[in-house]
Amino acid sequence: MRIFASIKIAGRALRRNKMRSLLTMLGVIIGVGAVIGSVSLTTGATKQVEDQVASLGENVITVFSGNQTMGGMRGGWGSAPTLNVDDALAIAKLPYVVGVSPEVRDRSQILANGENWNTQVMGESPDYPQIVNRNIISGAMFTDQDVRSLAKSAIIGKTVVDQLFPGENPLGQILRIRNIPFQVVGVFAPKGFNLFGQDQDDIVVVPYSSHMHRITTRTFVNDILVGAASDKMIDQVQNEITDLLTARHRSKEPDFTVRSQQDLMQRVSESSRTMGFLLAGVAAVSLIVGGIGIMNIMLVSVTERTREIGIRMAVGARAADILVQFLIEAVTLSAIGGAMGIGGGMAFSWLIAHFQHWPTDTPTVWIVIAFISSTIIGVISGFYPAWKASKLDPIDALRYE
Amino acid sequence: MQTKPVIQLDAIHKTYHTGEVDVHAVRGISLEIFPGEFVAIMGSSGSGKSTLMNMIGALDRPSDGHYWLDGIDVSTLNRDALADVRNEKIGFVFQGFNLLSRTSAVENVEMPMLYHRHRIPSHEQYARAMAALELVGLGDRAGHHPNQLSGGQQQRVAIARALVNRPALLLADEPTGNLDSQTSIEVMGVFQKLSDQGITIIMVTHELDVARFTKRMVILRDGKIVTDEIVPNRSIAEIELQRLRSEQQAVKLAS
């Protein structure tokens, strides 16, 4: 097969008709461009959501206490007093558990510096920052000793700092929670708003023991945060927690729920997979449309160039030479169209990222898929016209007007 | 003669089965053409000369009989082998020039080499195409496209294309059909020059004036050879051209 000669001939033929070649490619360019552009946008958005979910703390398992029904009114998860500190201490002894924090939540009015502010006051263990992936930028986390001694120490978020100690160093300052003085021993690194629009910096964290005995005087916790050693251990740890608590509570109905960050992750990736199928469908349709455009033009081109085919056959082109020539023309059109579409789509997503400040990301695998499938479309749509050309009789073709 | 013929036709028949009637286009032609000959095949339309030319040109196969071209029995070859024979043994010159439009003269001349069985390097293709253009006196027009060339120049590009693969036979089908008389004589001059260099040429024509430039005339009628003779008082292109010029001069002076 004189493949180099065929490539040369096809290249010359396409260059002879630049405008038509460009217009033929346009179908593929627009199709591939649209796919790459929308893939870039959705991938960027999905990645942002995934990052936010991950920022809530990876490998976090939350145990919620059960619901309770009072006078026909059913409370939600966490309303029944079924989990206590001992449950948390028992969970801490399970394998692959790297941190446990019994969590007590309460909205309280806090006072300091002659200012007051309503915020979320949480009782946690010293493991808390590590489990939920939060850093302390100044000061330090309270210790197990502080938990045992019901220390009046508090770590506060940036929003609380801004509201109560504007322009001051909050470390060592006194903060009154329900009129009980706590000393600020640390400040959390700012984290901004979470997925659900809550301000994650509007918090005060105190030892859970201090919270339960000094602020709210209760014996049960709202939930227990558990950190698993790795994401692969999450299922196992979840099962072990379920077994352990079922045994401890000796209840027929489980009076608690165990959920992990992975569940949320899974839902996110499920929705992005649905999006992916949708995009693949759009891609397939647009490529087929582009391919039909190429086939149409190639058929016109073969009819138009019947005489040229006759001349080529007269000077010694075999049927296969003609077939390959037209096939290469079609593939060149679709491959260049695909490449231009990829470039266009990436440029579009870059513009969106630059001017709209949307996160975009073009996965390499989609670039490869787009290029390969546009090339394959060229082969498929070029084959019939090329075959038709190669079957022409040289005498008839030469006589064609 | 002791040399082997370039073309040997042995009782060639061609029958077309179109519709209900069979058309006997060629009914038993035997013919030998030797190297260096310059032959005109003549005949009115329907005489079978186009059919004969298609078979000599390996574009078509005879229904019956044998055809040896340069020692190869072409009548038994398949489509691909015929294509190779056309590429290596035959150079075509057509009435309508049949150059590729929007393609430079030199690229047109290079075309047959692209289909050669053995790959010819690009620089050699270019060199050979240029040499062929020089031979027909168009070395300075290599970059021109067909629409920038006159009819005579286009036909000379076509002749260069026909010669570029060094064929055993140059086959011309009404090469002057689209040209005025002066250009026709010029093109015939090119053929005569090539013939003098020993190239075998077969030309199909229905014009006696044009046929008189050849050395041998074969006349067909109803698919058979009726006359096969040496051309008496052969026209020489240079002399004819001079005569034409003086005639034109005379017309100008008279008016």
Image: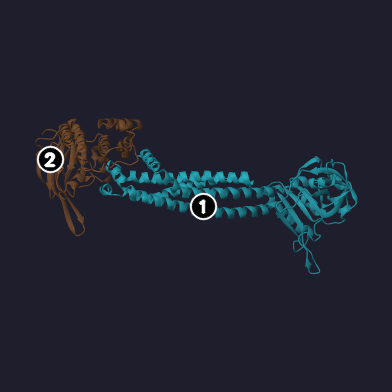
Identify whether A296 is placed above or below B133. Answer: below
* Side of A278 relative to A87 (left or right): left
Spatial CA span between label 2 and label 1: 67 Å
Chain that appears cyan: A
Q: Residue furthest bottom?
A: A72
Element under disc 1: helix
Q: Which residue has dot 1 on it?
A: A283
Residue B27 location (% of width, % of height): 13, 50
Query: Can residue B252 be seen in this snapshot?
Result: yes
Taking A400 as reference, is A164 left or right?
right
Q: Which residue is identified by label 2?
A: B217
In the rendering, at what x and y percent does residue B237 appear?
Answer: 17, 33
In this picture, is A312 found above or below A69?
A: above
Q: Which mark is residue A78?
A: none
Counting from the top left corner in percent of width and height, residue A88 is at 79, 52
Question: In terms of secondary structure, where does tag 2 sit?
Answer: strand
Q: Colour of chain B?
A: brown
* 2 vs 1, front mark: 2
Q: Nearer the viewer, residue B211 or A34?
A: B211
Q: Nearer the viewer, residue A86 or A344?
A: A344
Taking the image as shown, residue B20 lies to the left or right of residue A171, namely: left
Quadrant (top left, top right, bottom left, bottom right) of the N terminus of chain B: top left
Q: Note whether residue B199 is visible.
A: no
Using residue B197 as the reference point, say whether residue A255 is left or right of it: right
Q: Residues within 10 Å of mark 2 (few under 14, many from 20)?
A: many
Of the residues shown, which amino acid type is indicated by label 2?
Met
Chain on which label 1 sits: A
